[in-house]
Structures are given as structure tokens and as C-alpha cells.
Image (spheres, rainbow, N blue to C red):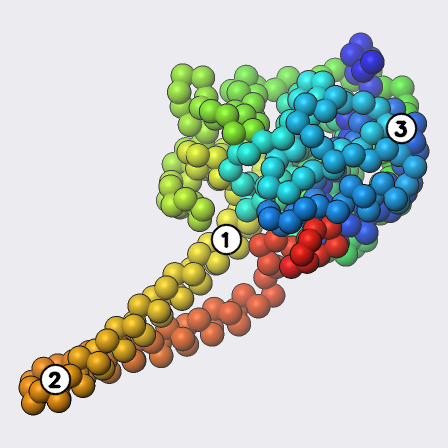
Amino acid sequence: MRDADTGRPDVVVIGASAGGVEALKRMITALPADLPATVCLTLHLADDSPSLLPGILARAGSIEVLPAVDGAPLRPGVVYVSQPNTHLAVMDDHVELGPGAKENGYRPSVDVLLRSAAVAHGRRVVGVVLTGMLDDGTAGLAAVARYGGAALVQDPTDAEFPSMPANALQGTPTARSLSLDALVDEVVRIVSSEPAPVEQPEVDAAVRERDTAEVRSALGQDPALPGGGTIGSPSPYSCPDCGGVLNEVLDDAPVRFRCRVGHAYNAESLLRHQSHTFEDALWTALRAVEEREEISQRLAGEAARAGRDWSRAHFARRAEDAHRSAAVLRGVLAQHREANSADPPLVDDVGAVSVPAT
């Protein structure tokens, strides 16, 4: 039975991305089988491949590791692992899997896991952000701190990929940054110690309603606020996924956005996805002008064979214009690729945990 009276921390939520398989294996190896807490973890996964992560982690340590299933009860000494193409959320006494829109381009999303646990369990949550790229987990860890939970981050200098923990620290300055080994020890200490006499912080009712609506959105439910409003205020930006208006979600940190149907982005993730959208648009334009060139050349040839000199010249000019436009677009694409060559891929750590590796 869960300890509802003392408020002892008994829900540990962990998010990782690139480099996360090895980091999670080290964590699971160090966790005792009788850990007096439920552990839920999310790792970015490819949408269309079965996950091998539960088996990998189960072999790594003595604590029980299970793939998360909808409705599984929160039990101490159990680790639930996210599954591909579904969000993992922590509710009052169980976990739920949700088909809601992607957040930061991911489903499962680290933000969803951390935010849902914070809303449901407040100061009884230990939130952890490990190695990874971009900034998924930044808003979720801020929610953990907002509701009084313990916020822990792998030291970026200790992480294989530092940007995800670095962004989490920037978004939650009160979070503690520890090496991976020290972080595991701290998790065990927190959930095994008598809770300090600290009151649950007061969270503004409007903020709680918003956070709860965001959890509903991840679960595929209606994300409307009480009274029918949408989350956030309209921004000048459009959603890279559906083209709808992105609303800016006013928060302490970080800058983030959400569209009407639920796609959500922290600022850095939005920038990265806009870059991919721009490249897709360039390829579409290049295809169109090259087709225009080919058709114009064909029409010019037919006009020449028929002795229609004016038509031949007209279509030849169109072909030349299209050829020049194609050359310009290829140059822009080359510059774009060079400028973004150091950017991470949109799915950045699937090789060791899904089949096939990508």
C-alpha cells in the first residue's frame, strides 16, 4: 500500500534520450530489488519498431522491470518502461498509455511522463533527466519542481550527450546536478529516508488546470480548459506537424508552445523541427521546378517538330527559367544542410532498443 499520510517520495520518473540505454542500464544495476518506490522511465523510441529495452534493463539488475501497460498499478520495487508510439503517464495509483499528439516530436515524451507524475503526486515525486539531445524533459522537470518534487539532473559533463540535461538545468535552476553514480545513490536515499516536514507548495489554480489539461491531451482526451478555452495565447508561429497556430504557454521556464490539437514544443525542439519543415519545402519546390523544366522542354520539342517557332521559343524560355530556379534551390539546400550538419536527428537514440536499428 502506498504511503499517503507521510508524503514519502515513492514515485521516481526518469527521462533519457541519446546515450540513454547505457545510462539506464547503470541506474537499474544499482537499484535494490526492494526499492520502496515505483520507477517509470521514458526513452525516445522509433514509432514503428518493437522495443527491446525492458529485456535489456531486466537483465541488468535485480529490480523487477516490466514494459508499461495501460492501467498497471504503481507498486514499489517495479520499473515500468515506456513503449513505442505511446505516451507513458503516471496517474493517482496506476500508469496510463496515451495516443495523444507528439510533444517535442516524440511519443513517448519525457515531458509527458514528468508532468503527469508532478500533477498526480506532487512532492512525492523524484524527477530525473539523463543524457540526451535537445530539450525534451525541460518543461516536465520544471513541473516536478513546481509541485514540490525533487528535481535531479545528470551532470552535463558526465553525460554522453549533454544538451538535454543542460537544458533541464537551465529550465529548473533549483535542480541538483550529479554524476550518474551519485544520482542513483541520491534517488535511493530520497525514497528510503523519512520525509522532511515540508508542506506541499501551493500551485495557482489556473496553472494546475493547464497542467491537468496537458496531461489529458497526452492521453488523447479533450485538452480544453474549463470554460472551453485553449492552452496558451496565440503566437506568430505555426505547428510543424499540423500547420495550426501554435499558442505560447506562459510559464516560468522554458519558452514553449502548444497547438489546438496537442502538438507541443519547447523552443529548441521547435527550431529543430522548423528546420526540417523548411528542408522538406525546399525539396518539394525543387521537384516542382524540375518537372516544369522537363515538361517545357517536351513542349518546345513538339513545337519545333511542328514548325511553330513562337511556341518553341516560348517553352524553351520556360525551360531555361525552371533550370535556373532548380540550380538556385539546389544551392540553398546545400547551404541549409551545411548550416545544420551538427543538429541532432529527430529520433536520436533507437539503435540499441528497437528493431530495426535506425
Q: Residue at x 65, y 59 (%)?
A: 358
Label 1 – label 2 distance at C-alpha: 45 Å
Does 306 sit above or below residue 272?
below
Q: Which residue is mark 3?
A: 35
- Alpha carbon separation for disc pair 3 and 1: 39 Å
Question: Please, is residue 106 above or below residue 192 in the view?
Answer: below
Q: Earlier in the sequence, mark 3 or mark 2?
A: 3
Which of 288 and 7 lies nearest the eye of the viewer? 288
Marks 3 and 2, how far apart in space? 81 Å
**Picture quarter containing residue 352?**
bottom right
**Residue 158 placement (x, y as % from top left):** 81, 53
Check if mark 3's residue and mark 1's residue have beta carbons within 8 Å.
no
The residue pinned by badge 2 equals: 303
Q: Amino acid at mark 3?
A: Leu
Q: What residue do we see at 71% from left, 46% from top?
A: 51
The kind of secondary structure element at disc 3 is loop
> Which numbered marker is on residue 273?
1
